[in-house]
Amino acid sequence: MKSKIIVALDVDNFDAAARLVTQLGDTVGMFKVGSQLFTRYGPRIIELIHAQGRQCFLDLKFHDIPNTVAKAVESAAALKVYMLTLHTAGGEEMLRAAAAVQPRPLLLGVTVLTSVAGDQQAEVLRRARLARETGLDGVVASAHEIVPLRKELGDKFVIVTPGIRPAGSDVGDQKRVMTPGEAVRVGASFLVIGRPIVADPDPAAAARRIGAEIGG
Ligand code: C5P
C-alpha cells in the first residue's frame, strides 16, 4: 500500500461516494465503507472502489456468534475487501473463528468504542492483546493509545487510527485528535480521515497536503 491514508466515505449517497473515489484516485491508499453506505448500497459500493483500482476497508464491526462472524468474514473475502473490523468484545472464540477463515481480508479488532465513558486504557490494552493472541492482524485505536499499544504488541501489528486533524482544521465532534504527522511518528500504520478530506472544497488537494505531511 503506497499511502497510509484511508478516506472514510461518510456520505449518504452513491453518486457522492463515486465522485470522491474518482477525485481522490491514487492520492490515498484506501476507502473506508461503513454501515451507512453499505446498508443502503451493498456490494455495489465496493465494486465501485475496485473498478477505480482502489482498495476497500469494510467497517461493519462484526459482533455475533462465532459461526455467523466466520461466515460474514467469508462473504467479505468473496467481495475482495482488503481489511475489515470486528468487535473484540465478541470474545476469544468468535475472534479465533474469524481468524481461521482462509483466504481472508486483514482483520482489525475494535477494542473499546470512544463513546464509552471513563478511562478505558487498561481494557483497550487487554482487548488488543486478545486480538493478537487470537490471530487478528491489528486494531483500530485512538492516536493517544498508539504508544502503549506499539510497546505491547510490537512493530508488525497493524494500528489504524481515526480522530486525525491537520493543524488548524475543524475538530468537529472528535475529542482526542492528533495531526497526521504526529500519528504516523508515534506508530500508526494507517490513518482514517473523513471530514478533513471529504468536506474540503478540493478533497484531492486536501489529501495531497496530508500525504506530503506524512511523507507519502
Ligand atoms: O470525519 P472524521 O475524520 O472524524 O472521520 C473519522 C472516521 O473514523 C469516521 O468514519 C468515524 O466513524 C471513524 N471512527 C472514529 N472514532 C473511532 C472509531 C471510528 O472517528 N473511535
Image (cartoon, grey):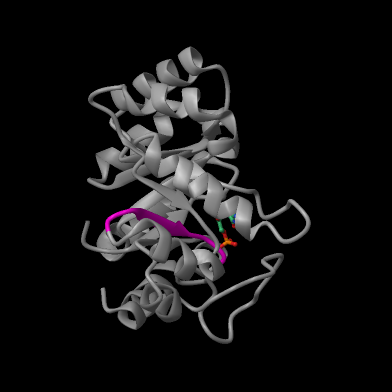
Q: Say which residue appears at 33% left-offset and 78% top-offset.
A: 214
The quadrant where residue 135 appears:
top left
Q: Can residue 27 be seen from the camera position used here? A: yes
Query: Is 46 in front, or is 130?
Result: 130
Residue 110 vs 79, above or below: the answer is below
- Residue 26 in percent (x, y) is at 25, 60
Q: Say whether residue 50 is left or right of residue 162.
A: left
Q: Say which residue appears at 65% left-offset and 74% top-offset.
A: 171
Q: Say which residue appears at 31% left-offset and 34% top-offset.
A: 105
Span of residues in magenta? 156-163
Magenta span has 178? no
The quarter of the picture showing ligand 1: bottom right
Q: Say whether residue 200 is left or right of residue 2.
A: right
Image quadrant occupied by the N terminus: bottom left
- Residue 43 in percent (x, y) is at 41, 27
Q: Say whether residue 39 is left or right of residue 117.
A: left
Identify the residue at the far top of this view. Answer: 67
Identify the residue at the far bottom of this view. Answer: 168
Query: Is 160 in front, or is 18?
Result: 160
- Residue 83 in percent (x, y) is at 35, 40
Image quadrant occupied by the C terminus: bottom left
- Residue 128 in percent (x, y) is at 48, 48
Q: Say which residue appears at 55% left-offset and 29% top-offset.
A: 91
Residue 35 vs 9, above or below: the answer is above
Residue 48 vs 114, above or below: the answer is above
